Image (cartoon, rainbow, N blue to C red):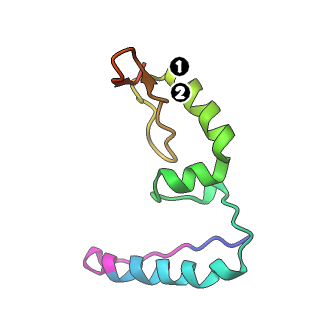
Amino acid sequence: MLNINTRWADKAESERHIAHTRQLYDSFLPYSAGGVYVNFLGDEGEERVRAAYGDARFARLQELKRRHDPDNVFRFNQNIPPRLVQTAGDHAEGR
């Protein structure tokens, strides 16, 4: 298990440090089994959250979110957006 944490003091250096951290992460990918531990994720996007849960579990969690939090009030940390529902007019709705 690998968990990369980087920190820096000067916000003006963020781009450089983030790029370095991503480069470090990419250098370890050939040695990875491809798993993701959801509690290690930062703000890495839905694709990484989906990878942590797997497609079937992620879809089930989206359906739960649609039923219990359709407005996505609890959207911080590793967000799972509510599943969009297709209506008769093919317009996606969150409820």
Membership of 19 in magenta stretch? no
Name the residue furthest left. Answer: 12
Q: What residue type is labelled 2?
A: Lys
* Closer-to-camera residue (51/88): 88
Identify the disc placed on residue 92. none
At horizontal 53% and vertical 19% (from top left) the residue drawn is 68
In the structure shown, which secondary structural element does the residue marked by tag 2 occupy? helix
Kind of residue indicated by mark 1? His
Residue labelled with disc 2: 65
| Horizontal side of residue 82 vs 9, given as left or right | right
- Give the answer, above or below, for where 24 lies relative to 53: below
Q: Which residue is drawn at 55% across and 32% down?
A: 62
- In this rendering, position of residue 31 left or right of residue 92: right
Q: Give the range drawn in magenta.
A: 5-15
Residue at x 63%, y 78% (from the top left corner): 29
Give residue 27's position: percent from left, percent from top.
Answer: 58, 85
Q: Position of residue 45 (x, y in %)?
A: 46, 55
Viewport quadrant of the C terminus: top left
- Residue 43 drawn at (x, y percent): 45, 57
Q: Are marks 1 and 2 in contact (CB under 8 Å)?
A: yes
Q: Residue 50: percent from the left, percent from the top?
A: 58, 49
Task: Find numbered disc 1 in the image and state the secondary structure of the residue it sits on.
Answer: helix
Q: Residue 68 carries which label?
A: 1
Asked which quadrant contains residue 14, the reply is bottom left
Q: In this view, does 42 lie to the left or right of 91?
A: right
Mark 1 to mark 2: distance in Å?
5 Å
Residue furthest out toward the top: 88
* Left or right of 84, for residue 59: right
Q: Quadrant of the N terminus?
A: bottom right
